[in-house]
Image (cartoon, rainbow, N blue to C red):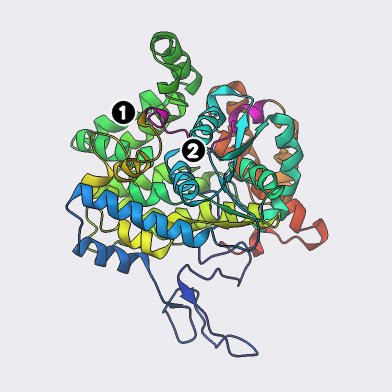
Amino acid sequence: RYGYVPAPWSIYTGLYKLPPGCTLTVTAPAPPAGFLPGADSAPGAPRRYWSVAEAAQRGMAEPLRDPAAAVTALDELLRRTVARQSVADVPVGAFLSGGIDSSAVVAVMQALAGRPVNTFTIGYDEQMFDESRFAAAIAQHLGTDHQALVIGPADTLAVVPELATIYDEPFADASQIPTLLISRLARQKVTVCLSGDGGDELFAGYNRYIATDRLWRRLGVLPRPLRTTAGALLGGVPPAVWDGAYHQLLGRWRDPRSRQRNLGLKAQKFAALLQRESLADAYRGLLSFWDAPRRLTVAGEELPDALDEPPPESVAAFMDRAMFWDQIGYLPGDNLAKVDRASMAVSLETRLPLLSHELVEFAWRVPLALKVRDGRSKWLLRQVLYRYVPREMIERPKMGFSVPVTDWLRGPLKEWGEELLDPARLRDEGFFDPQAVTAVWRAHQSGGADHGNGLWTLLMFQAWRAAWQPPAARVTADSASPG
């Protein structure tokens, strides 16, 4: 469903992840009888020393009302945090994508430094995915010592065989590839790198926050049968048709910097949203690579995850609830795992100023009106960034750290994918339904649907299994843990 194994579960039976903000005390030779993985659930279980829920409760009880004061406070807090995290007895640099978060971190870092800061970015052969030109412009304005690496399918092919051993368990955020490559680039010059991770989850940066809230306000009042029918009709239009129509009718008259990307995929998500029972159900769907993962599997069940944890009562607005769920689920399970494994694979230490506990607690004091204003996300963080970088260098649609996996699976990675998803192989292994998977693969190859990111979850599972479970050591689906 999510492309990663949510905490506290792991891919291995009887092994659990330590939840964020927790300590675990173990008395040799083994954990006490009746050990449970959930925090504070039993004697000897993990104990929380800090939690998002408590930070949210405290923050929302003391909201910041003055916009100007809030901008100044965030600027000062960011400067203190970046200064603290820039201290090291080894060379220090920063990732710079050209987006709001990394640009804010680099801008403050350069303002505090006595010499040009080393910054690094990744670009793509495919212009639709390439943000490196924006990062280069910002680096030039700030005066950093900037390096960029442009990658293509050949670079991806070289990295793919390593992913299963780097991530230890199945992990399928395709941006793991550029994350590994930019970590390698940075490690050539520095040992520590600052990153802008966390800004989206703290300051309402994801498009899905605003779009879901806005659409559900308008469409949630419609009878569900009507919404379901409309969603089915819209979902039946191939993504390529949406993309082609957009570029032909509207895209030609718009500034390339303001054009929407992946319009067809967004249209499919919108179609799925129309068919949801509730807003919470709609948000789970937006986070899912597969809406009904059990249709693809022979056995297994879904275990509780972050979206099953109710936010504090004070966290009532949808966007606040979505940020809460992301901070306890998607952020540590996907984004932080991705950066940590990729950077440590090349012995690069990453530090995340926006996720210091002081900044997280501060962000929960910021009301939604200072996070989203006039339809623009991360309003407060943008105001801080404008103190260092001209507004016109920043204002453009959000791109994210994406990769063109959809096209790669139809091209240079097609043979690799077909080998891992061979029906005979799937039948012998017993985890995935060969008929269902083959149907999805063929639909993707024909262009009738965009299953690139979804197929990546299956391929990463298959690649992980091939790397970590040689045939003689493999278990059958019947004996495997559902976790």
448 in relation to 100, above or below: above
Query: Range of the magenta residues?
Result: 392-410
Q: Identify the amino acid type marked 1.
A: Thr
Note whether 216 is above or below 24 in the view shown: above
Q: Are marks 2 and 1 in contact (CB under 8 Å)?
A: no
Name which residue lies at 56% across and 40% down.
Answer: 144
Residue 260 point in image, percent of width and height: 42, 24
Residue at the image position 24 percent from the left and 38 percent from the top: 373
Give the residue displayed 46% in from the left and 87% down from the top. 43
Residue assigned mark 1: 229
- Residue at 70% x, 30% y: name it: 153
Q: Residue 252: x percent and y percent?
A: 43, 9
Residue 299 visible in the picture:
no
Residue 20, image x, y percentages: 47, 67
In the rendered image, the quadrant that contains the C terminus is bottom right
At mark 1, the secondary structure is helix
Does residue 215 sit above or below 68 in this rendering?
above
The label shown at residue 142 is 2
Q: Is residue 394 magenta?
A: yes
Element assignment for label 2: helix
Outermost residue toward the right? 472
Which sits in the foreground, 375 or 247? Answer: 375
In magenta stretch: residue 120: no
